[in-house]
Amino acid sequence: MVDQSDVHEKTFSPSLNERTDALQQLITFFGSFSDKQQALEDMLRLCSDEDKTLRVKAINALGTVFPELSDDEKEKGWNSLLELIGTEDPEVWKAVVVSLIFALGYVPEKSKPWNCLLRLAEDENRHVREHAVEALILLFPSMPNREKVWADFIALAGSEYGDIRELVSDAFILIYPYLEDREQVWESLLEPAGSGDSHVQDRAGDIMARIFHQLPDRKKAMQDVENLTMGQMGYIARRAVKLLRDDYPELYDAENPVEELYRLAAKKAPYARWKASGTAGKEQGASSKKRKEEAEK
């Protein structure tokens, strides 16, 4: 049996070989050590080692020892992983995420680390918030309350940060299949679909188009779509209807003037294209004739 005090001392050694050996002994004998708290602190120290290779190995090892930890020690280990989440090094980041995923299965109160990640998702540091959202996306299948997860992502879609709105709305397609209540999904998407962010609108619209046929009240859903259309294209559409009503009385009588406007536009468009192409052809012919006459001179 290895002496735990010797392992502890090696974690402070200036020699990389000795620190590496200390980590290996921590991994091998962690369950046998009498002082688990000291062993955890030694491993956490190596998770911030100056040598990146050793740091990555220690972070990977931290996830594997979670079954041996008490609830308080698990919380300490989880918080240490969260402190590393803003790293700019992709290799270290990958190790952190793998450990987070593994560790979550052994955290008794999963809402605590989840809520910590939610707070980090609004951090001023771009790397911190983006990595926090990426971790949330990877961890959501392990969360017991999928409705809360969905509500949290819907809320983050209204973030003040554009990068977070994009990441979160892209994740809609991954999360919504886990929810059984399609009507609830539809209602929750109405606000993102009407937001000022075109990317969020598109992603919300993608899901709404997929679940429309599964809704019990199609009439209400159609009204929701109409309201969104009027809200997003309100000024342009209403202004066009007002200007064109004298020339097109059917707009005035239509139950849905905007929809009638689109129908009229589609109906008139072929003529407009034909007229434009005909005019262009005449102009091109005249121009060619003029160039020919000038050449003959």
Image (tube, grey):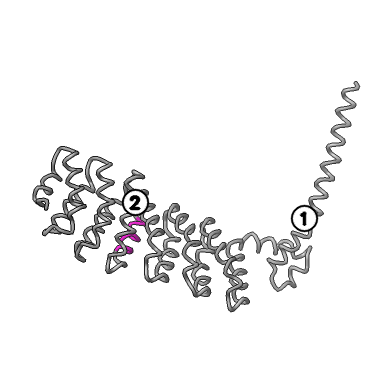
Q: Is residue 89 left or right of residue 24?
A: right
Q: Secondary structure at mark 1?
A: helix
Which is in the foreground here, disc 2 or disc 1?
2
Check the picture and name the quadrant holding the C terminus.
Answer: top right
Q: Residue at x 25, y 45 (%)?
A: 55
Please tell me the numbered disc located at residue 170. Answer: none
Name which residue type carries label 2: Val
Quadrant of the rendered structure where residue 116 is?
bottom left
Q: Main secondary structure of the magenta part?
A: helix
| Residue 243 shown in magenta | no
Name which residue type carries label 1: Ala
Q: Position of residue 194 (x, y in %)?
A: 54, 64
Q: Mark 2: few, some, or many residues within 10 Å (few <14, many ≥20)?
A: many
Q: Mark 1: few, some, or many residues within 10 Å (few <14, many ≥20)?
A: few
Residue position marked by numbered label 1 in the rendering? 269
Residue position marked by numbered label 2 in the rendering? 128
Q: Secondary structure at mark 2?
A: helix
Q: CA distance from mark 2 to mark 1?
A: 50 Å
Q: Residue furthest top?
A: 297
Question: Which residues lie in the magenta part?
Answer: 113-122
The answer to the question of whether label 2 and label 1 lie on touching residues, with beta carbons closer than 8 A, is no
Q: Residue furthest bottom?
A: 216
Q: Position of residue 253 (x, y in %)?
A: 75, 73
Q: Is residue 260 left or right of residue 20?
A: right
Pick the front one: 228 or 176:
176
Pick the front one: 29 or 227:
29
Q: Residue at x 60, y 69 (%)?
A: 225
Quadrant of the rendered structure where residue 221 is?
bottom right
